[in-house]
Image (tube, helix red, strand yellow):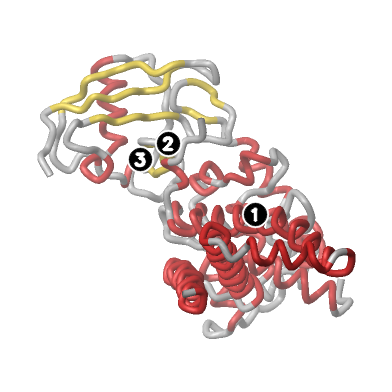
Amino acid sequence: MMDLRPRSHPTYLAFVVHRASGLLLALFLPLHFWVLGSAITGEARLEGFLRWTDNPLAKAAETILVVLLAAHLAGGLRVMALEFLGWRRRQKDMVAISAGVALLVGLVFLLNVA
Amino acid sequence: MAEPASLKVSVWRGGEDGAFQRYEVPARTNQTVLDVVTHIQRELDPSLAYRFACRVGMCGSCAMTVNGRARWTCRTHVKRVVDADGALELRPLANLPVIRDLAADLSPFFDKWQRARGTFLPKQSPDGAVPEDFAVVPPASKARREADAGIECIGCAVCYASCDVVAWNADYLGPAAMNRAWTLVNDVRDGARGERLDAVAGDAGCHSCHSTQSCTERCPKNLDPSSAIAGLKRVLFWDTLLGRR
């Protein structure tokens, strides 16, 4: 069992979110391309699938996916600012801003869904 | 917060495969964790091995794992790390071989300073002779400020023990060695920039850092090794892209 005590700080959590969101997005991508590919092979099947995604559970999953994507993007920009621009200061504020951006994007997405 | 009357201290005894031993230590005001360890060794169990020297946060020899976190014990007040139950858990620093009890072997840590070319090499006299004149380094220059930011390292290995990448990759140079390398990369008098950048590039060097920033979070001197490593990555990136290496 991993000892969480040495790792309990915001920038470590940001690292975990960035890594986990990246892995989940990598798992999602093949599914995404497979669905896009079905547009060429079977239009009716794609249409059926798209209608299926209108159900609330798929919409919820889609919202989580959007939040993951936004979190990965915002977290990636934060790390790039540290590494390429040398933004040393206020790292925890930058983590909070990245998290805020991700949740905001999720909320905006939800507004359009409703 | 209520102050406990006595501290229930679990201390790591033995080598890598040792175990915790319990001691009861009277709680006092303004007591540091090093005071607690010293009480155990002087009053309860003289066989306890631990390391300290200056007791004022200068020498970097008393670092241990206190309630799961690497800390300098001479400047860590017990009341900052202990709850009302008075429980204190002490282990040797992580990511280093255990000599015995609370004493970790810091040889791999300092070996990596050498591997990261942590030694200053005067540009004007690579043979080690004293340069003819003083080097002029403007205090406000960017390089000088970058070097200043990392120069107060006391070599306590708290960052090294807090770094997950060190735990994952035994060859990884670690935050302190690369912080040192970054101060020298920014030292305009230094003549080993190329070799040093070669030494810190690659899988065991700065490119393995995931910027979890545990080093920066835990450094007792409030240094920022994570940003120093980011600086090395940045210099290596541009130097490689522009063909300067």
- In the rendered image, the vertical position of residue B153 relative to residue B15, given as above or below: below
Marks 2 and 3, how far apart at CA: 7 Å
Which amino acid, by three-letter code, is at mark 1?
Answer: Leu
Question: For the residue carrying disc 1, how many other residues have a C-alpha within 10 Å: few (<14), some (14-19), or many (20+)?
Answer: few
Q: CA distance from mark 2 to mark 1?
A: 37 Å
Q: Quadrant of residue B183?
A: bottom right
Per the model, the C-alpha gap separating discs 1 and 3 is 41 Å
Mark 2 belongs to which amino acid? Answer: Met
Q: Which residue corresponds to mark 2?
A: B64
Above or below for B206 versus B157: below
In the image, B5 versus B138, the foreground residue is B5
Q: Is residue B199 above or below residue B168?
A: below
Q: Residue at x 68, y 61 (%)?
A: B120
Q: Residue A17's x, y, as percent?
A: 54, 56
Q: Which mark is residue A24?
A: 1
**Image quarter hosting the N terminus of chain B:** top left
In the rendered image, which residue does mark 3 sit on?
B73
* Residue found 87% across the figure and 71% down from its top: B245
Could you say where residue B208 lies in the image, as x and y percent from the top left?
Answer: 70, 53
Q: Secondary structure at mark 3?
A: helix
Read off the chain for label 2: B
Residue A106: percent from left, percent from top: 50, 71
Q: Is residue B127 visible?
A: no
Asked if labels 3 and 2 touch by Cβ distance under 8 angstroms, the answer is yes
- At horizontal 33% and vertical 42% (from top left) the residue drawn is B74
Position of B58 with respect to B143 (left or right) is: left
